[in-house]
Image (cartoon, grey):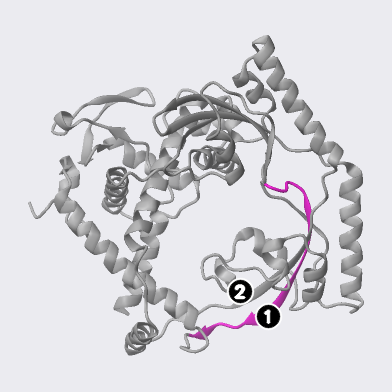
Amino acid sequence: MKSLIKTMVFALMAIGFQILQAQEIINDEEKKVEVKTPVKLGNRIKADGVAAVVGDYIILDSDLDRRIDQLEVQGADLSEVTRCQLFGSLLEEKLYAHQAIQDSIIVNELQMRSQTEQQIQSFLAQPNVDGIEDLLEIFKKDNEADLREEMYEINKNRALSSQMREKIIADIEITPEEVRQFYNELKEDGLPTFGTELNVANIVIIPEVTEEAKQDAVDRLKEMRTDILENGASFNTKALFYSMDGSKNNGGKLGVMNRKNPRMVKEFRDVVFSMQEGDISEPFETDFGYHIVWLEAIRGQDYEVRHILLRPELSQEAIQKAKDEIDEVRQKLIEGKITFAEAAREFSDEEETKFEGGKLTNPLTQDFNFELTKMEPEIYAQIQDLEDGEISEVLEDGDRLNPFKFKLVTVTNRIDEHEADFSRDYLKIKRLALQSKHFDAVGEWQEETIMSTYIKINGEYRSCEFTSNWLKNE
């Protein structure tokens, strides 16, 4: 099972990148200086030393404790994970982030700010977190603004690391013969068992926003723009009070956009890159709603922007109309007047699924199979009490593009737990084989990059038994 174990380790390594620590950047002349920074621990003060240096990044002694606190907030089971293993993951993260910067990789600032807000709300929803004060304690921050900035840096580092890994494996492909060889290697040690899998389909009806509601959002943005330009009102304050996304807490600040790697929706970047420094745009539409943008500054290829986002208000009439429509669709399904696939193609408003008869695609495997034990909690909650082919009651749902929508779900097929079969499970086996090649490529890259990057491990961590050559055979 050597190849399978290697693949599983690769998957766990990828999961480990989901929570990254805040960074500190040091100059070349500082790399050999073990700075001591006081850190408050309850009523005591402990000197926070430099545990390691990786390229232009340092890892403080406190970073590992903070990593553990954050994983525990998410409910992770750390009973079989050692401190040395977690420290090794920190070293890997910094190595990826350092090399990403060397390779001029740029992250999506808007996405990072939005993700930061979503993560804070997710943390606050955890049963073991008692309000924002708990998060401030975990992150050792004095206020929410500092907390958001640190989490933004965490997400930025995560994105840099992720994009660096993607760059390493981007051109790696696998042939059918390599897949067969991988499968034969698995057979020698015993084939893995795949758990019960389900095919899930849905029909989604989205309440229609009226033209009046759209125009009202546009008019409100125009009024804000006029007040700012003619009366000197604060853009930041209006964003704080009225904007409908996570950037509101930073006065609408989205960070830096770059012409070389804009990574924004087309409508947004078209507006920003046509503006002059200091301009405030007219209202414009994206999938997220209606915006006005203030281009604060242009620094070479970098554009510093803020925005205010308004989403048109849904009327009760529109919501009721959508509810009546999906009730009617469900009745037709119950009476057998139409199949679920036919109803999805005819009535569903979800473009991603309607032309597949409503079937959901598993984002991990890119097929229609969802392993029952690994299904997203949201999907599982919607189908857990359904028999195969049974139509759910009307469900209320929502996302960041459509905060309110109605849904019907059904289980269209069930595949019982079984030993891996080459023909039946080819896509899964191919994915495992490709991950194995990715693992090898990442290992080779990491080995080479460690040797060419300045790395210094201090104190107790020098006695760790790392799987990678972080000590460079010292």
Q: Main secondary structure of the magenta part?
A: strand
Whether residue 465 is visible to the viewer of this picture, yes or no, is no
User: Could you tell me how far apart the alpha carbons at marks 2 and 1 are, in whole angstroms?
Assistant: 10 Å
**Contact flag, marks 2 and 1 (Cβ < 8 Å):** yes
The image quadrant that residue 128 belongs to is top right
Q: Earlier in the sequence, mark 2 or mark 1?
A: 2
Packing grade of label 1 (10 A; few <14, some 14-19, many >=20) is some
Q: Does the magenta stretch include residue 465?
A: no
Query: What number is the disc on residue 413?
Result: 1
Image coords of residue 330 (percent x, y): 87, 68
Image coords of residue 357 (percent x, y): 73, 73
Describe residue 139's horizontal placement relative to residue 414 as left or right. left
**Extreme residue toward the left, this view:** 474
Residue depicted at x 49% and y 89%: 423
Residue depicted at x 44% and y 42%: 155
Tell me the residue that label 2 is attached to: 368
> Which range of residues does the magenta coloring cover?
401-419
